[in-house]
Amino acid sequence: MTKLRMTTLLVAATVAAAPFAAQAQDGMARAKEKLATYTEKPEFVAPGDPFDIKQCAEGRKMLSIPNNSGNPFLKGIIDRMKAVGDKIGLEVVEWENQGQPSQWVQGFDYAIRDEFDVINLISGISPDTVEPQIKAANDAGIKVMTSHFYDPSFPRNPLLSSSLPIGFNEIGRILANWVTVNTEGKGRVALIVSREVPPTIPLVDGFTEELAANCPDCEIAQEINVGVAEWGTKIQPSVQSALQADPDIDVVIPIYDSMSQFVVPALRLTGKLGQVKVPTFNGTPFVLDFIQQGAVSMDIGESLDWIAYATVDGHMRDLCGLPVPEKLNVPFYIFDESNAKDAGTPAQFDTGYGDAYVSGFAKLWGLE
């Protein structure tokens, strides 16, 4: 090949690559700009008009049914809902279960038998799987609601009295932009999901769409789908196998941070702990401790106490015939090595977000 021919080919290749490089640069800039929103301390925004919540809640009972009581994130929310309920005269009870649909059905039977006013399906139980029970509860005069479950884009099951969705699609986009920025646009990702949980779908959609838009050199190398009831037995060996089969994976994303308790041992056993980046979502305290220890890279947190306040607020508005917020009005906040200690050492459920919501809800509810 002549020198002139080689030069011509090099120039042509450079020209062809220029638009791709520009796309990557633009994507990196967009990702950085979007991430900045979630690094600022959250501010309280009222989810509706003021109302007398004590008058509404006094003497009422709410049964909260999580998809699995072994999930510390959900356990933390329900414990805080109980504390909020004590302040306003609302009895909040958890229906403890191990993630079995038959146990969810038993929870409905209990609520009907003991004449609860509200059943709260929190984060994970699809109303479609318990429709006969919802109908029976409705016939008994019980309002059935979901919280921290649907994405705002989802159509709500018509049997529900109301729903307080959160931005799962938005969470997926935050994760994608974090990967873009923190791998310099070159991430090779193993994504751990539970597709049986409906919010997983918009979260993964947001992740894949945002990654494609802003990180053309990034790749989802593997998706590992594990059912909620099998997290304890299948996540660790699946992650180990993935890392051994593809040593170029440099990011592992457990999309719900309670999965991290099974990811970290897999990284340790494969010698990848501290080398592979682990971003995730929920803000569960033990995962924030993992960040302080260098085992997890980032957690998109939500104050569990803030979630509890917002959930009680929305459900009491529904119970008293007031307009219900279109979503669970709780902000997302990024914790990483720069600020994880703000959550406490060891981390606490409600620390690091500020306390603007406490006085905000107290004023909104007429408690001040």
Image (spheres, rainbow, N blue to C red):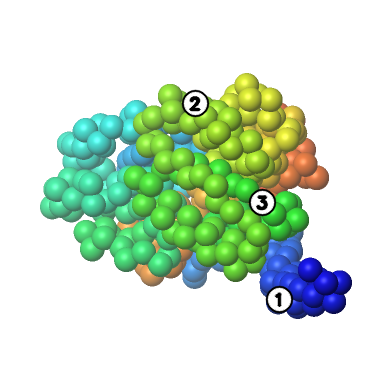
C-alpha distance separating marks 3 and 1: 23 Å
Q: Are marks 3 and 1 in contact (CB under 8 Å)?
A: no
Identify which amino acid the numbered label 1 is placed on.
Ala
C-alpha distance separating marks 2 and 3: 22 Å
Could you say whether the residue bearing mark 2 is in a helix, strand or loop?
Answer: helix
Q: Which numbered disc covers residue 237? A: 2
Image quadrant holding the N terminus, namely bottom right
Which residue is under mark 1? 16
Q: Is residue 60 visible?
A: no
The crowding category of the residue bearing disc 2, from other C-alpha atoms within 10 Å (few below 14, some 14 to 19, many at least 20), is some
Q: In the displayed structure, would residue 177 be above or below residue 134?
A: below
x%, y% of residue 158?
23, 63
The quadrant holding residue 276 is top right
Residue projecting furthest to the front = 1
Mark nearer the N terminus (2 vs 3): 3
Which residue is under mark 3? 187
- What is the total number of numbered labels drawn onto the structure image? 3
Q: Which numbered disc covers residue 303? A: none
Q: Is residue 105 visible?
A: yes
The crowding category of the residue bearing disc 3, from other C-alpha atoms within 10 Å (few below 14, some 14 to 19, many at least 20), is many
